[in-house]
Amino acid sequence: MKKIGFLSFGHWAPSPQSGTRSGADALLQSIDLAVAAEELGADGAYFRVHHFARQLGSPFPLLAAAGAKTKRIELGTAVIDMRYENPLYMAEDAGAADLIAGGRLQLGISRGSPEQVIDGWRYFGYVPEEGKTDADMARRPIRGRCFPIRPVCSGSSRSPRACASASGGVRPPTPPPNGRPSSA
């Protein structure tokens, strides 16, 4: 065997019998686990990403924090379901976490499983236009470039479903006045 590491799902439960009772507990204990694993000589610390469950759902702040507290151990995701991610934002967040971790980030991604989460993007307020599919929605170019699609929401509601319903779908972000993304 050349290398050894661990995979954590970051389960938590608001139960008196649980040693991990909240999302905060799961995140802080995961950082401590990565530090302890490095001290014991492990080579990798990997975290599974699960949305809509009492598990780790936002990997990059966790990986950045673990990267700041460790020096050698490889840090990564195992795996991120890309159906729930904006690839441009994810790449930016992963890049920042990798910089903080000194280049030790290993990114694991997947297309996801087709069971109950087949249309999970709807929970984030995204709805394909009439006659279009979710794949069409994800591939839609804007002025020859790919820009993230964001939900349109009017009123005071913060609910993604209410936003999608109120807006009738999604629209692209407004491009900058000169038609080019800013360099800042």
Image (spheres, rainbow, N blue to C red):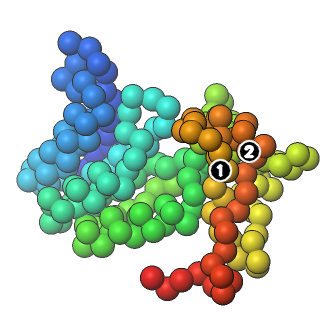
Q: Which residue is depicted at the point 35% across and 46% down? A: 47
Q: Which residue is depicted at the point 91% across and 47% down? A: 131
Amino acid residing under circle 1:
Pro
Residue 129 appears left or right of 13? right
Which residue is disc 1 drawn over? 151
Q: Residue 167 in the image: x percent, y percent?
A: 73, 44
Which residue lies most toward the right here? 131
Q: Which residue is depicted at the point 58% across and 47% down? A: 84
Residue 2 appears left or right of 84? left
Which circle, 1 or 2, is nearer the viewer? 2
Tag 1 secondary structure:
strand
Residue 3 seen:
no
Residue in the foreground of this view, choosing between 34 and 168: 168
Tag 1 near tag 2, CB within 8 Å = yes
Indicate whether 53 appears above or below 152. above
Which residue is disc 2 drawn over? 167
Q: Quadrant of the N terminus?
A: bottom left
Q: Residue 59 in the image: x percent, y percent?
A: 37, 50
Q: Quadrant of the C terminus?
A: bottom left
Residue 122 seen:
yes
